[in-house]
Amino acid sequence: MTKLYHVQEFSKLAGVTVRALHHYDRLGLLKPNRTEAGYRLYHLRDLERLEQIVALKFLGIPLKQIRRMFQRDSSEMSDSLQMQRRVLEEKRRLLDCAIRAIEEAEKATAPGNRPDSAILKKIIEVIEMQDNMDWSKKYYSEEAQAKIEERKKLWSPENQERWSKEWSDLFRDVEAALGEDPAGAKAQALAARWKKLVEGFTGGDPEITAGLRKMHQDRPNWPASMQQRMQPFSNKKVWEFIQKAFAAGKATN
Amino acid sequence: MTKLYHVQEFSKLAGVTVRALHHYDRLGLLKPNRTEAGYRLYHLRDLERLEQIVALKFLGIPLKQIRRMFQRDSSEMSDSLQMQRRVLEEKRRLLDCAIRAIEEAEKATAPGNRPDSAILKKIIEVIEMQDNMDWSKKYYSEEAQAKIEERKKLWSPENQERWSKEWSDLFRDVEAALGEDPAGAKAQALAARWKKLVEGFTGGDPEITAGLRKMHQDRPNWPASMQQRMQPFSNKKVWEFIQKAFAAGKATN
DNA sequence: GCTTGACTCTGACGTTACGTCAGAGTTGAA
DNA sequence: TTCAACTCTGACGTAACGTCAGAGTCAAGC
């Protein structure tokens, strides 16, 4: 005759609450015996089951699925666990990203408590950067991705800001020079600036350059947020002008 | 006159759903203007706000708190973010633990698809081990903790299983020898086995030994689950016998 | 002017894993 | 018998929306 436990005692044994045991009972996950009066009576072997439930719950598996796993006790378990591992790894990636965003924001605003808007801006920047990296991954080969990871380390926040400013400056200058001759000295100077900035990102690597080109051609399929951010650079005439300038430059060489 | 947006258009701009915008409106997070007919009209500067909301949400901050942060726009922001970072780091710790548990289980059961119960047992083992490590931390000095981390790497699953078995064997043997003389050869042999097993964990390190002693003395305050697991070793007479045997051993040296 | 299709509104219920009462019955001891 | 301690069930609350459902709005074509 092994001992029988009432809910409270049993809940303490397993480190869960009484209400949780009620819950598992109703969901059909762990149905104990009952006294005549309806009191739940737990057996020691119920503890084993409960521990399994708690463990699977700890892994983030929903209770309904746990119930299914017990019912069709098949080899489904292995598959479920593999899937769950992928889910958890994805969650960890997002978590890491969030933590990094806060860290960067703290780093960037530690000297002199800047207003909130600045902190937020920094956070949004980090998140969006991460986002864009993720999304633009599909355009790059694996090797190119690895190389970009390498180059990312060199991108200090200041560098990035400067880079961003140089692009908008250059774009403005090209816009102002649209009437000029693409083969002229002025246009060629602009083309040179453009080339240098592109190389600042690609590092002259052909893999990365190819990915960038692919990405640019797929522009209609970019997510809306990216289109939004790229709106200042959406003037088609500028792109055409630069292309002509490059062509002219090659022709004269 | 900057453009005004209807919900759908605006939702696409920001990459959220229409229903989410309804939600933020009702919570008072982002209240757009309305047409006479009651249609929501978003301004471009609303986009900035929305991006901030999305960013903070990404960091795991609940919407109600985000609203408070906007209302009392004080320096509360920095504090909230620091707190949130701690929360996120704790979450990551748990996530890592869960992932490790699944990995170990997969590793341990990969050769020949073992029945589910074996996989579960492995997972529970890993989680509980982690749990106990966390909880028992408070008994050890920082140095001792670092040393334990080192030694943990040597604990292969097989090693741990063997260790666990040796303990229960030894305990059974001592229980059977309770009538003997603590100073006798048999008792001394048991004491030697005991000492060796303890050293298997402490590695002879005094810091770890001290922590272990502290932990053992605090036994009444152990969590219920630990007490449960230690129940097979709760026979007080065995501990007393071993203590006497050690004392006798020292006396004769 | 009317219809039609595309939008929009609000309210209500569903989701997850319980927490928190509230009202009522049970048990064991003084 | 009475009292404290325990147990039961059902109902509502939580977070951040998703998913209808019923109803109103808007612009265009006939």
Image: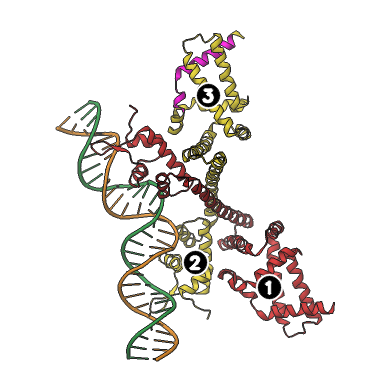
Chain colours: A red, B yellow, C green, D orange
Q: Name the residue under label 2.
A: B16
State how far apart marks 1 and 3 are (Cα).
71 Å
Considering the numbered disc 3 on the image, is that residue within a helix, a strand or a loop?
helix
In percent of the image, x 35 and y 28: which residue is there?
Answer: A2
Task: Give the x, y percent position of residue B1.
Answer: 52, 81
Residue extending farthest to the right is: A253
State how far apart marks 2 and 3 are (Cα).
58 Å
Q: Mark 3 points at which residue?
A: B167
**On the rendered structure, is A3 left or right of C29?**
right
Tell me where residue A229 sits by quadrant.
bottom right
Task: Give the x, y percent position of residue B91.
Answer: 52, 48
Q: Name the residue under label 1.
A: A168
Question: In front: mark 2 or mark 3?
Answer: 3
Query: What is the three-letter code of the residue carrying label 1?
Result: Ser
Residue contact between numbered discs 1 and 3, judged by CB atoms under 8 Å: no
Prevailing SS of the magenta stretch: helix
State how far apart marks 1 and 2 are (Cα).
28 Å
**On the rendered structure, is B125 left or right of A226?**
left
User: In the rendered structure, does residue A75 fall within the stretch colored magenta?
Assistant: no
| Figure quadrant of the N terminus of chain A | top left
Q: In this view, does A58 lie above or below B61?
A: above
